[in-house]
Every structure is written in structure tokens, then in C-alpha cells.
Image: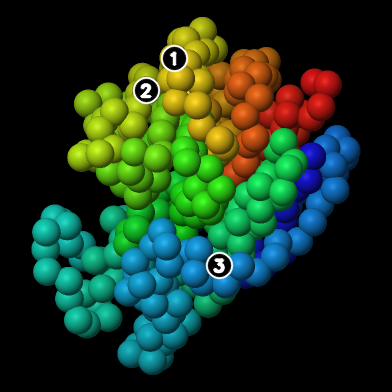
Amino acid sequence: MKTIYSPKHKLHATDSVIYDGVPFITEEIPARAELILEAIQSAEIGPVLPPKDFGMDPILEVHDAGYLHYLQTAYLKQQELFDTDEPVIPHTFAVSRRARKPNSFLGLRGYYSFGTGTPILAGTWEAAYWAAQTALTAASIVLDGEHACYALCRPPGHHAAADLYDGSCFLNNAAIAANHLLKAAPKVAILDIDYHHGNGTQEIFYSNPDVLFCSLHGHPDEDYPYFWGMPDETGDGDGTGHNLNYPMSRGAQDKEYLLALGQALQKIAQFQPGYLVVSAGFDLIEGDPIGGFKISVEGLALISSKIASLRIPTVIVQEGGYKMEELGSLAATFLLKFLPGK
């Protein structure tokens, strides 16, 4: 199985951020992708290839043009206004999406974001752009006939909506890949196994009957992103019934998770999609510093095996996962089940 990877992710250098004179601490750092890359090479998963450049059009099909312009220009705009190299971090927020869209940069900082934990740095846009191209390249490889392809994306993407970012996500790589796959198939399914709900992906496809979105995640009463992810969020308009959430309480173990996964996989099989996109977050594993489940390594292997058993052409898109000492081996464990004969 091919892996798509770009070193451009290192331009989003979140491991060296200073804000208000002190280090800005985040779990989402460049070493994550490097540890995964090293592990899949050691496990001989398959060749590692650079992404192709599909340009802005596939991104514009998913994200608002004004939002993209903001992401591209925010860091330089802040430099011009304040003569500072500090990251762009909002302080006030449009608490209702019915609020008016401001014209000023200071207002836009809180209009397009819903949190303070996702800094925009000098290289953020380029890193996010190439993460999207990584997902698009993986999708194109599956469209060309490969059964599965892994997009080693960083920054991750599933918290990014059409015009909203946070949770370390700027462009929704999985949604961009799924939308690209829809050009060749009438229906696509997305399965999000990251510990945190894929609120951005949900919002993007909430009214779209051609996409089935299933998310298994920590309960929004207990964990980020808090405002989305309940079972009664089933879609809107023509998309009603095509959004399925499976929230679980903190401490959920293999048995409970696999039961919910079985329900989601049954729905996906009934939907009969031409392609499957998996938002693969490994923060579901026991001991992840920002996760809350107690899924074992053996449980993760079972999760992967059951998803692979659908035998649907699959694009695997990297999302979260922050247990650094195991992250690479977790990715390899998951990916191995998609290899022929496994």
C-alpha cells in the first residue's frame, strides 16, 4: 500500500511557538508525522510517495473562498498590523454563526475560529495546503485502481468546517478527498474513528445525501469539541439519515467500541458506497494524553481488520494521535490490515 507524505508539514512548526513571551504548548507537533513515517517504513507497508498538486479548485469545492483567503493571509496581516512574529490566535469569537461577518482582520480572527488552541504560523497555510494535496493524491491513487492508500496528513483536518477552524485543523483533508471521490462514484462513506468528533466533516456534508458520515467518538458532554456529536444529529434536508454519531463515555473499552463500530459498518455496507474514507485518529488508544478511551492495541487491530473486511476501496487519512512513544507502531498496526492477504 502506498503512503503519501510531504515534508512541507514541518512548516507548521508548532513545537517552537512563543506567545506572549512563553512557550505555546500543543500536542500537535511535527514529530508526530515523522514518527509515523519512520514506523511504516520499518514495517515495509509500501512505497512512500510525494503528493501531486491538484491546485486550489478541489479545496474551493469544500471550503469558503473568504475563509481560504483569510488562512492564506492572516499571518502576514497580523505582522503588518502589530509588527510581531507571534502566531495568530483569536481573543473574541462570533458566538453564533448568525452573527454578522466583520470586515476587519481583528474581527475575522474570531469569526473563522472556535478556539484558541490552533495557532496560525508563518508556514501554516503551506503545510495545510500540502496536507490537502496529500489526501487528494491518495484519493486519486484509489480512483486509479489501488484498493487502499494512506494519506499521512499534517495538519489534521476533521475539525475544519467550510469556514471554521480549530482542533489543530485548517483544511478538512478527509472531506476534500471524499468530495474528489464523488466525481467517480455516486456515493461515498466517511468513517471517523478519531477520539474526538469530526464536527467539520459533519457540517460539510450535513445536507448531502451522497455522503454517509459515521463518527465514533468521546461523548460531547465530556470532551472536545463539545458542541457537536450527539445521536440526534442525523442530517438535514436531503441529507437526513446520512449523518450517524456514536458517542461513548470516557473509559470505553474494546467491547463497547467494537459494538458501536459494528453498527456503523453495517450502515456503511447498506449504503453501498463506491469508496470509503477513514479519518484515522489514534488518540482512541488507552493512555493517549488527550483521549479518554481505553482501547487496546489488540482492539485497534480488530477495528482495522473489521473496516478492511468491508472490501471497499479506501482512502485512509491521518487525523489525531498523541501517544508519542507508540504512535508510529499504532499507525503500522492499523495499516497492516489493509495489505493484501492480511
- Label 3: which residue? 129
* Residue 296: percent from left, percent from top: 61, 17
Q: Is residue 281 left or right of residue 338?
A: left
Are the two marked residues, 2 and 1, in contact with CB atoms closer than 8 angstroms?
yes
Q: Is residue 326 left or right of residue 126?
A: right
- Label 1: which residue? 263
* Residue 154: percent from left, percent from top: 59, 55
N-terminal label among 2 and 1: 2
- Kindly identify the residue that appears in the image at 61 percent across and 67 percent down: 54
Tell me the quadrant of the picture where the N terminus can be found: top right
Tell me the amino acid under the disc marked 3.
Tyr
N-terminal label among 2 and 3: 3
- Label 2: which residue? 246
- Kindly identify the residue that appears in the image at 34 percent across and 27 percent down: 245
Q: Is residue 117 above or below residue 282?
A: below
Q: How crowded is mark 2: few (under 14 residues within 10 Å), some or many (20 or more)?
A: some
Distance (Cα) linking label 3 and label 1: 34 Å
